[in-house]
Every structure is written in C-alpha cells, then in structure tokens.
Amino acid sequence: MGGVWHTAWRRLFFCGWHSFHRGSTARPAERVEPFLRPEWNGIGGAERGLRLLGTWKRCNLGARDPAVQPSRRPKSSNPFRRAQEEEWRRRNKTALTYVAAVAVGMLGVSYAAVPLYRLYCQTTGLGGSVVAGHASDQIENMVPVKDRIIKVTFNADVHASLQWNFRPQQTEIFVVPGETALAFYKAKNPTDKPVIGISTYNVVPFEAGQYFNKIQCFCFEEQRLNPQEEVDMPVFFYIDPEFAEDPRMIKRVYRNCSPCCSLAAFLEQCQDQGNAMANTYDKNVEINWK
Amino acid sequence: MSTAMNFGTKSFQPRPPEKGSFPLDHFGECKSFKEKFMKCLHDNYFENALCRNESKEYLECRMERKLMLQEPLEKLGFGDLIGGKSEAKK
C-alpha cells in the first residue's frame, strides 16, 4: 500500500515538476536517466520507473513543449483515408470561401440598393418623386396643350405661432399644360416687430403633383417682414405637357360642349353640365414661424 | 400633411423651385404691374392664357429692379409674345 502511495506520489511529483520546468530542452535520454538509477527501491525499479516515465510522458503532452510540438497529423494513418480527408478539407475550404463571398456580396448589394432605388424612382417617377432631366430649355420648347384646361386652386395655411396674415390673391386659376403662369399671395405683418417666416408647399392629388413645376417662388427661404409691412409674393409655375399623356389624369368630356373661343363662353355654355374643369389641384402653402 | 404618421400612404415630396426664390418686393416697386395683372385675371374669369402679357410685364419689372435674375423671355415661356404685340393668343 505504501508502494502504491509511493508510486502515486511520484507520478504527481514528476508531473508537477515537469510543468514547472516547461520549456526545458533536455533530451529524452536525459529525462529517462533518473528512472534507471539503481537507488530506486521497490519492486522492479527500472520497469516501474519506465512505467512512471510513460505516465510522466503523458503528463508531458499536457504541458506543451514548443520544441517538441507535434504537428497536426491526420486522424488515421491509412493513406487512402488521409487523401480523402485532405480532399474533404479542401472542399470545405472552397465552400467556406464561396459562402463568405456571398455574404460580402449581399452586404454590398444592401448598401448599393439605396442609390439604385432612388435612380429607379427618378426614371419611372414612382411615388411622385422628381423626374430627372427637366432642364430650363424644356420651358423654351414646350408647346401648350390647349384642349386640356386645368383649374389650380390656391390655399394658404399659417402656423399658429406665426403672426402673419397670409392669403392667396386669387382662389383659382385656369391653365393648360405647357403654359407658364403667375399667381400671387399676400402677406402682412400686423405686429410691431420684424417677423421672419419660411414656407413650404404641397400639391394634391399626389399623382398630379409630379407635373407641377415651379420656376420661381417664395418658398424654402426665410423671408423677413418689417413691422406693419405688406408684400406680394409671386409664384411662377407651369404644368408639364406630359400631363396630357398620362392615362391616370382623367379627362372630362362634355356633351355638346367644347372649349371654343374663351373660357367665359365655355363656362356659360357648359354651366348645366357641372364644373368646367378637367382636374382640380389644391396648392397648400404653410408658413412656419422660426 | 406630412406630419401624420401614416406609413402606408404616399407622402408629397416638396421640390425646390428651378430658379430659386423671389426676393421680397419690400418697396412695392412692381405693385402697379401686379395690380394690372390681377385686374386682368378678375375680368377674364381667372383664365391665365389671356393675361400672359401682363404677367410678362410684371416679370420684366422685377428684372429691371434687380428683384429677379435677368433671363431671356423665351426661357420663361413667353417666346410667342416676344414676336410683337400683334401676336395674339387664343
């Protein structure tokens, strides 16, 4: 029993001893040598010693010695199996490369999608977005479509905290696509202090709003009104001639009526058929106090 | 307007004007032209096609007084009016 204890203690001792002396470059022969000394007592000293050495060696593997680090070796020594494993490893690597490439590609596509979608919307005019390619020489060359009369109504809203009196000077105006038109709003500052306001606009219905082009107006820039000052604010706009070709823009046809000489005569003739307009717009201008 | 949180409906995207913003006419220098234009509109049942001369004159006034950038009138869509006063619109 003491012998067993002795053996176990020795095993632990030598394991611990070796881990303390990690990195020792003692050759295997030198390490074996103390086990073969005759002063080892007990039964079968040399064999026991070698057995211990085996244990010790097992311990050795736990504490890695960089000098004798074994290289990764295939799990089997069968050459065919080894070749197959190499093949599998190569295939795995290729598959992994492909998967990584697809993942990176997806990430790139998701980043590129934003400008691409914007481009797509611009070319198709989806959702009322700006249709690119409208230069000022288009105004020069556009031809009014005289048989589509459009009524544009004007509306003005003022933010509660802005103390301007802001209203349109005409409630409606009759235009045709391709013709530039002028409209006026009036703003008055009834207070005794200068007030700065900024305005924005919208056009309804949205599908028709994409044809509404402003050449120049008073919106999107801060406008300052001095105390008790009243100004006229013009809006210079036109409706794109392509409006006439859009099938979504409903055209009202009146029986026994056609725009002949002037709108007044037309309205008179067609009064009984209801409103004499092809489409209705509302232009809302909102002024926000800043 | 665009303040409502309705994600399903289309929202309107305001676009800036092509030639920017009109400077304010603080001194009312072109007020007489504007009055003429508004009177013309009132008389003609707000038909724009009959009052294009007056609108052209208003814009010319603005350009003279430096309240608007100088532009050839063709670029503003008045090409048919430039030929002469005798050019009649329908």
Image: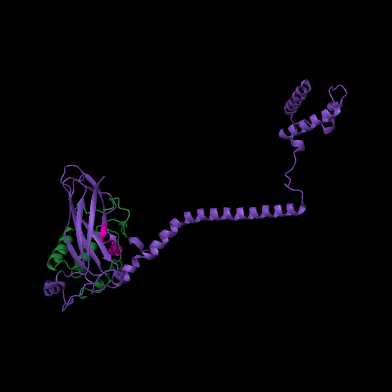
Chain colours: A purple, B green
Left or right of A74: which side holds A41? right
**Which percent across, then down, holds residue A159?**
21, 48
Res. A268 image quadrant:
bottom left
Measuring from the top left, give residue A136's x and y in whole percent: 34, 65
Q: Nearer the viewer, residue A288 or A195?
A: A288
Residue farthest to the top, as pictured: A2
The quarter of the displayed image where residue B15 is located: bottom left
List the single residue furthest toward the bottom.
A256
The correct choice, above or below, for A228 with respect to A101 in the image is: above
Position in image of residue B18 (x %, y %)? 32, 60
Q: Is residue A138 magenta?
A: no
Q: Please say if A52 is above or below B82.
A: above
Q: Name the residue furthest right.
A: A38
Horizontal and vertical percent position of residue A129: 35, 60
Residue shown at 74% from the left, 48% from the top: A76
User: How many numbered dots are placed on residues in this image?
Assistant: 0
- Report the span colored magenta: A202-213
**Can residue B29 be seen at all in this image of the molecule?**
no
Quick one: quadrant of the C terminus of chain A?
Answer: top left
Q: Which residue reaches farthest front?
A: A1
Is residue A216 shown above or below B49?
Answer: above
Q: Residue at x 75, y 38 (%)?
A: A69
Q: In this view, does A143 lie to the left or right of B86?
A: right
Residue A273 at least partly seen: yes
Q: Is residue A206 magenta?
A: yes
Q: Which of A196 and B59 is in front in this view?
A: A196
Question: Dividing the image into 4 quarters, which one contains the N terminus of chain A?
Answer: top right
In which quadrant of the rendered view does residue A44 lie? top right
